[in-house]
Image (cartoon, rainbow, N blue to C red):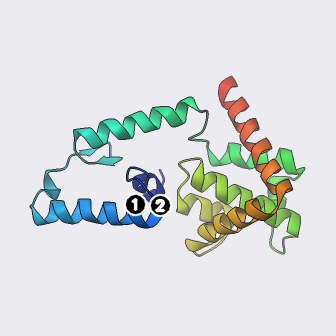
Amino acid sequence: MGGLKSQRVLEYFSGPRRRQLAGYREFVEGRLAKGKLEELPVLKQAFIGDEDFLEEAKRKAVKVSDEGEGTYPLKRIVQAICKVRGLVEEEIKRPGRSEEVQRARELICYIARRRSDVGLRELTRFLGVKELSTPSHGVRRAERRMSQDQDFRRELERVLKLLRHSSMQA
């Protein structure tokens, strides 16, 4: 199972990331000051919060599921990217990667971290890297490419469409 998904937690607080962080800090510190943090239930090791927080989290999880996004296994993500990019998995894992393979690895990082529950350790093992920060760097590179490269955005959409389609058939 994956590690803590901070972005998912922060999405429960409104506004830009800085305001979300401040809201989260205020929530935790407020509970600590009142001695109420230990009162918060831990539900399936996924949610820490009161009943309102839990209901909101469940509602958002259902919404994500209804949109066809969500939890894709790493193997399916890799298969979809290989199909769209015309690669085989061994090429993605091999050292001395070409630009073509680097783009595929960035797509894997982005989808695995933003659109699934793949944890950093699982992703790090798959990529054959030592640092847990490597997938996060891959996500940032993918986000930069998306803002600058229309072909990269189209590839991402094709991969996501393939994943959604394969989820419906599963």
Vertical placement of residue 137 versus 55, above or below: below
Q: Residue at x 59, y 33 (%)?
A: 67
**Mark 1 — residue?**
20
67 vs 115: above or below: above
Q: In which quarter of the image is residue 160?
A: top right
- Which amino acid is tagged 2? Pro
Q: Does residue 94 show up?
A: yes
The residue indicated by pointer 2 is 16
Name the side, left or right, on which 156 lies relative to 131: right
As helix, strand or loop, the secondary structure at mark 2 comes to: loop
Measuring 78% from the left and 53% from the top, which residue is drawn there? 153
Q: Where is residue 30 in the image (x, y as percent from the top left)?
A: 18, 62
- For the residue carrying disc 2, how many other residues have a C-alpha within 10 Å: few (<14), some (14-19), or many (20+)? few
Examine the image and state in which quarter residue 53 appears.
Answer: top left
Q: Distance between the residues labelled 2 and 1?
A: 6 Å
Which residue in the rendered view is the most extreme toward the left?
35
